[in-house]
Amino acid sequence: MICVAISDKNVKNCMNTLDQIEMAEIRLDLTGFGIDEIKMVFSHKTPLIATCRPDQKGQEDQLERLSAAIKAGAKYVDVEIEALSKQREKIIDIARQFSCKVIISYHNFEFTPGLKELYQIADKCFALGADIAKIAAYSGSNADNARLLSLYSMNKPVVILGMGETGKLTRIMAPLMGAEFTFAAADTGDATAPGQISYSKMKELIEKIEKELT
């Protein structure tokens, strides 16, 4: 499944995009949606991830926005691995009450850690309460890609992504390796991470590979 990362500040544009895709991540720290707008968006039938990065919003504001999204119907909520324990526990508690899956995410915009550290990070995500562990790291070589993709051998619910041009391969391979979803940019609008491929292009590439494998 392809998850489109949405940061569009226009609610109507956001809703129109949701009508045309299979899954989306709504970056509440970037959209600027008010509580009523959040409730409207997350009432959409498309499976949605609620994400609100703490570096953009204060903790109280983050909790309010994510709570509204979860209660309105978010299928997933993303919480960064660095989140303060009390904040993380509050978000996870609300998610459990509303049958919302928890994604604990790790991001490294500078480099891909070593293999041992990557496995430790994934294990920590699950220890902190993740239903799905998401690891995104800057990939500067095929060796970085290989280390990242090796995490699928854990046979656990993980989404592993290499950021940057070289890391695009990991985004294409993710659903083929067993990830529940991969991330793509909206066909119109800005990417929310380096190396994101547009939804249409991602769909085309994955379908071509799947056809060759059958």
Image (spheres, rainbow, N blue to C red):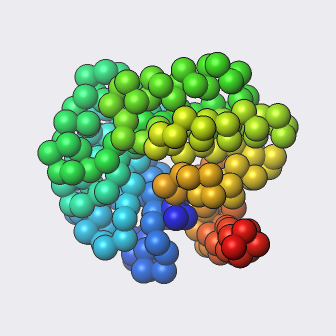
Q: How many tags in the picture?
A: 0
Classify 51 as above or below 6: above
Residue 156's spot in the image, x, y percent? Answer: 47, 39
Q: Is residue 101 visible?
A: yes
Q: Residue at x 58, y 68 (%)?
A: 186
Q: In the rendering, at what x and y percent does residue 47 appear?
A: 37, 65
Using residue 71 as the reference point, say whether residue 115 is left or right of it.
right
State which quadrant residue 48 falls in: bottom left
From the viewer's perspective, tell me whether residue 115 is left or right of residue 140: left
Quadrant for the C terminus in the image: bottom right
Q: Residue furthest left?
A: 97
Q: Position of residue 85 (x, y in %)?
A: 31, 21
Q: Name the residue at 20% across, 43% down.
A: 96
> Could you say which is closer to the camera, residue 44 or residue 61?
44
The quarter of the displayed image where residue 37 is located: bottom left
The answer to which of 194 and 130 lies nearer the viewer is: 130
Residue under the image location 49 percent in, 75 percent down: 21
Task: Please tell me whether residue 160 is drawn above or below residue 175 in the rendered image.
Answer: above
Q: Is residue 57 visible?
A: no
Q: Residue at x 60, y 38 (%)?
A: 153
Residue 20 drawn at (x, y percent)? 48, 80
36 over 157 or under it: above or below: below
